[in-house]
Amino acid sequence: MPYAKFDYSLDYKNLNLREQPELYRTGIGEQGVLLVEPYKSEILPFWRFKTPEIAKESSAKIYKLFLEYKKEKDFVGMDMARKFLQMGYTRSRRYANHKSGKKYDGPVPDDKKGQSGAHGREQLPRIEDAVKAESAAIFYEVWQKAKNDKTYQKMLKEHKESNRIMT
């Protein structure tokens, strides 16, 4: 049986998923990372990766929040912290590979806005930025620590099992 996908139809601006965690769906990767409150507002101010020093401080603070959510048995908070750590890695890698942060040449077609992918555009050449690559490595290590946390893995499995799509 497939698992429930991230539900983009919910009114996230008016939802507090700490109060209604049953509405949360993990989705894939970083889906919903900039939507789910109050976690977005709690974690986003600390999310930075411009230099390795900033990335180290940022990832440590976000991991500390992960541990606080774990102590509170707050799976949604743990998953959101994990998503911000993952996004720290992926965005740092994006800037490590493309100084402008843009992977593709030209604008996203109007009918494809909000979707990832090339959509017929050429990929820009990769030029490695060692500073951003180091930031990415810092976030990657902390992301993996959170992702592989035994309590997180147990709660993730339980959450996914409780949100299976019954067919």
Image (cartoon, rainbow, N blue to C red):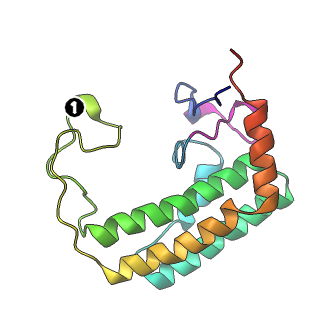
Q: Is residue 60 above or below residue 143?
A: below
- Locate the C terminus and report the quarter of the image it occupies: top right
Query: Is there any visible trace of residue 20 in the rendered image?
Result: no
* Quadrant position of residue 37: top right
Q: Is residue 132 above or below residue 126?
A: below
Q: Residue at x 46, y 82 (%)?
A: 52
Q: Confirm whether the magenta stretch covers residue 58.
A: no
Q: Is residue 64 above or below residue 80?
A: below
- Locate the N terminus and report the quarter of the image it occupies: top right
Instruction: Answer few, some or many: residues within 10 Å of disc 1's Cα (few below 14, many 20 plus, some between 14 and 19).
Output: few
Amino acid of disc 1: Asp
**Depth check: 75 or 12 in front?**
75
Q: 20 left or right of 7? A: right
**Depth check: 61 or 28 in front?**
28
* Quadrant position of residue 16: top right
Residue 97, horizontal then vertical, whole percent: 29, 69
Q: Is residue 56 above or below residue 108?
A: below
Residue 155, horizontal then vertical, whole percent: 80, 48
> Magenta residues?
13-27
Q: Residue at x 17, y 65 (%)?
A: 125
Q: Which residue has dot 1 on it?
A: 110
Residue 114, horizontal then vertical, whole percent: 35, 37
Residue 81, horizontal then vertical, whole percent: 64, 58
Q: Which is the main secondary structure of the residues drawn in magenta?
A: loop
Q: Residue at x 49, y 76 (%)?
A: 137
